[in-house]
Image (spheres, rainbow, N blue to C red):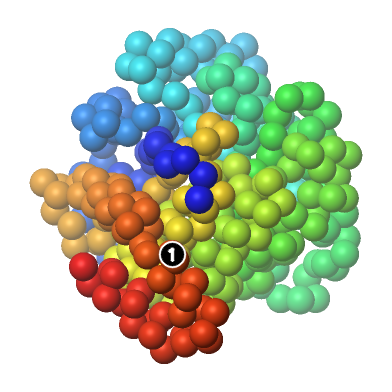
Amino acid sequence: MPSPNTYRFCFGPWNLSEGADPYGPPTRPPRDFNWKLAQLRELGFEAMMFHDDDAVPDIDSKSEQAIVAEAKELKRRLDGEGIAAEMVAPRLWFAPQTIDGGYTSNDPEARQYAIDRSRRCIDIANILGTDLVVLWLAREGTYLREAKVASRSFDRLVEAFDAMLAHDPKIRLAIEPKPNEPMDHAYVPTIGHALAIAHLTRDPARVGALIESAHAILAGLDPSDEIEFALRFGKLWSLHLNDQNGLKFDQDKPFGSTNLRSAFNQVQSLERHGYGSRGEYVCFDVHPFRATKSEHWLAHLDNSRRTFLRLVEKARAFDQAGADALIADRNYQALDQMVIEHLLG
Ligand code: GLO
Ligand code: MG
């Protein structure tokens, strides 16, 4: 393993959610951005992830001049607090224009809207001092196969990515794959899809990926294999660690909450490849359980980081030589038990 990493952590304002779900009222009172930023500082996280409209609320109703001015003001505040912006993501999926998708919509005006808004998002990223734009392709998919032609959708995704890459010669795009929700089928469900599509763009070197543990599980894949795959290509530019109990709604549970061993495997992969040593952050895309009281609002973030750091210790203390001997002897029964006992402590 390379020399021990130190990790830097971040989360986004949406990770302090109000406890809403489609079947009942919110369970925690709304809090404004200032409160969320103060909590991030209090918890000692180093950076914040932003949607474009977290950075500039009501972005669609504002002129380019006003957007630039607000983004600059935010940057001054972040600098004052010593907080970095890890990335900016265009939150296309709340806009009325993107009901049928953004980049892959059948409506050319909607596609143009999505591209124009993504360009503005890049401008905000520049002002906030990050070269990373995250693309979770929420509505780039279909509810029914006959509604869109998949190959045409891939062309449209490439067209949109190319427009973003052309807009700024330094910006990097990190695609965040997810197989479903809100769509039945998404066009970029796995890291393999993301990296393949990167190669169709005008500058593949600037198109990489972000892996979210829960999304890999929803695709029926092992998150640590997805992580290793992206790392093998030098393409893991960000991470959304969390957990997920099987093939259900996207749960965004605290890291390690469901499957501690899988969380350990993810940490082992990050350690093995020096994740973080090239400036990447460990982000937790986690939500409090709906039943969480306001007094316990921050626990899922602090707990995810605690679990992560405990698993880093576990990864470093793992008897790899002992494991290698068992592997050489094909004694996988003993290897299995060795891992279990190591985790049990
Ligand atoms: C939802 C995604 C979402 C994105 C975020 C950044 O399933 O995980 O939380 O990560 O909007 O683009
Ligand atoms: Mg995510």
In screen coordinates, is 314 left or right of 197?
left
Residue 92 rendering spot, x and y as whole percentages: 61, 44
- Taking the spot 38% from the left edge, 23% from the top edge, the residue there is 83
Q: Is residue 120 at all visible to an observer of this figure? A: yes
Task: Name the residue rendered at 41%, 80% in the picture.
Answer: 335
In the image, 314 versus 205, the foreground residue is: 314
Q: Residues within 10 Å of mark 1 (few under 14, many from 20)?
A: few
Quarter of the figure that contains the C terminus? bottom left
Left or right of residue 4: residue 201: right
From the image, tell me which residue sits under label 1.
Answer: 320
Name above or below for residue 170 compared with residue 114.
Answer: above
Query: Which one is in front, 235 or 287?
Result: 235
> Is 187 above or below relative to 27?
below
> Which residue appears at 47% of the width and 75% of the height?
325
Q: Quadrant of residue 259?
A: bottom left
- Which amino acid, mark 1? Gln
Q: Position of residue 330 (x, y in %)?
A: 53, 86
